[in-house]
Image (cartoon, rainbow, N blue to C red):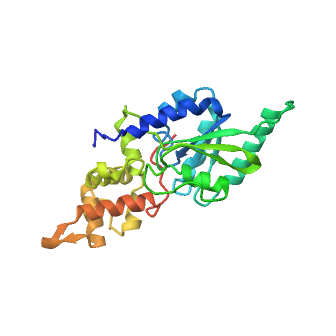
Amino acid sequence: MIEHINWYPGHMKKTKELIQENLKLVDVVIEVIDARIPNSSRNPVIDELVKNKQRIIILNKTDLADGRENEKWANHFKNKGSNVLNMNCMSGAGVTQLLSLLTTIQKAKNEGQILKRTLRMMIVGVPNVGKSSLINRLTGRKSTQVGDRPGVTKGKQWLTIQNDMQLLDTPGILWPKFEDPNVGLNLAFCGSIKDEIMDLGDLALELITVLQANYGELLVDRYKIDEICETPLETMEAIALKRGFILSGKRIDYERTARAVLDEFRAGAIGRITLEKV
């Protein structure tokens, strides 16, 4: 297993400070997490910072996750007292429900008040979970950059959404140390940690190991291999042979195979997969 992932850049520290400084200005925190890894994509630093602030949890990328698990995770967070919505921020699925919930919260906060106050909220989450896609849906325009790599959003932005509600965007924030190495792997599988600092061959092999154990039939169907092999490395080599990823001298092109498996997993091409169960 890949045990050490060194990735904590200086801007993460600045983002933590930015969240601390601006929490007092907001009424609600919207936490966006990846439905494929609902536990790993929840930053314990955010939990520590947000504390008792009212929170909405967005299970994003539900279109890429196992539908059976999406509802289980939503119920899990609801039972812990959070407002939860299953969403696909790229397509906009769930945005209407979120706006309705925010309007309800705003009305509740202004009930009995002579001076009506606009609702202010902050969007937080680890890199690459879809915060910018959500903001663009809420504002109805391309207000923020969207990318399939972590670290696209660079600084805070105050934006106006429906009913003049105010929204503060923040860059993605990770945390200094993973107590569980599987958390780091899950984040890397889903693209929340930059590929440039990883050995993609090793990372893809780790992903194949997980998929082989839990979604083997999807690997067989996607890559048209005869069966799941005895070891993940043999499965990876079978995928390479089926795709024709061969170098001179009949050598396996492990790098090209790794990139294909990672890209296709992240795009949902292998199938709807949830790496963490409730």
**Residue closest to the far left:** 249
Q: Position of residue 17 (x, y in %)?
A: 49, 32
* Count of numbered circles in the view: 0
In this rendering, position of residue 176 left or right of residue 69: left
Q: Position of residue 175 (x, y in %)?
A: 42, 35
Q: Position of residue 105 (x, y in %)?
A: 75, 38
Frontmost residue, 129 versus 243: 129
Image quadrant of residue 219?
bottom left
Residue at left offset 36%, top offset 70%: 224
- Looking at the figure, which quarter contains the N terminus? top left
260 relative to 180, above or below: below
Residue at left offset 54%, top offset 28%: 49
In this rendering, position of residue 260 left or right of residue 173: left
Could one spot residue 41 in this view of the protein? yes
Image quadrant of residue 170?
top right
81 relative to 221, above or below: above
Residue at left offset 59%, top offset 37%: 76
67 relative to 31, above or below: below
Could one spot residue 81 in this view of the protein? no
Frontmost residue, 208 versus 141: 141
Residue at left offset 52%, top offset 35%: 18
Image quadrant of residue 75?
top right
Q: Position of residue 31 (x, y in %)?
A: 57, 40
Frontmost residue, 14 versus 128: 14
